[in-house]
Amino acid sequence: MLATKFSLGAAPRPDTSRTGNSRKNMVASVEASLKRLGTDHIDLLWVHFPDELTPMDELLRGLDDPVSAGRIHHAALSNFPAWRVSRAVTLADLKNWAPIVGIQHEYSRGATGARRRDARPRGGRRRRTGQDRRGECQPAGHEDPRR
C-alpha cells in the first residue's frame, strides 16, 4: 500500500497561483509524487490540510479526476474539521465523485484544552512524546545517545 499526502501545492517557489488545494495544484502534486516515487499509481492520497480559498467542489473534483484516470485509487482527508468532512462526503456522494474513504484527525492529549492539566507527568516536568527516561526499556537495537 502506497500512501502520500498533498498539501497546499508543491511548487519550489510558491506564489498565489501555485499554492492552495486547487485542482491544478493537486494534479501537479500527484504527478510530482508519482515521478518521485517511481510508480504509476498511488493507493491512497491524503489531502493534508484544508485551505480557506479552494471550494470543496473543486477539491473533490480534483480528487475524482486522478481516481477516474487510475493515478490514485482512493482519497482521504487529514486535519479537516468534522463539518468539512461531512460536507465533502455528502458532495462526493451527490455528484457521484470518488468517495472519501478515510479521515485522520490530530489528537494529542497535550493539544486538547480540557485535558491539558492531565498531560503533565507526575513530578511537574513535561516530556515530549517519544522521549524516554533513563532506565526505561528501549526497543531492541536502540542506543540511548545520552549514555
Image (cartoon, rainbow, N blue to C red):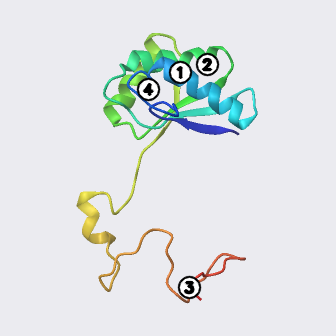
Q: Secondary structure at mark 1?
A: helix
Q: Amino acid at mark 2?
A: Pro
User: Dot 2 corresponds to which residue?
Assistant: 66
Helix, strand or loop under label 3: loop
Between disc 1 and disc 3, the foreground one is 3
Residue receiving disc 1:
63
Q: Position of residue 46 (x, y in %)?
A: 53, 35
Task: Work out how far the residue at label 1 is from the one at label 2, CA to CA, in angstroms.
Answer: 6 Å
Q: In the displayed structure, does residue 108 sit left or right of residue 64?
A: left
Disc 1 to disc 2: CB gap under 8 Å: yes
> Residue 4 at x, y = what percent?
60, 38
Instruction: State left or right for residue 135 relative to residue 95.
Output: right
The residue singled out by tag 4 in the image is 21
Query: What residue would you read off at disc 3?
Result: 146
Q: Which of the image's four quarters has the C terminus?
A: bottom right
Quick one: label 3 or label 2, which is nearer the N terminus?
Answer: 2
**Foreground: 130 or 33?**
33
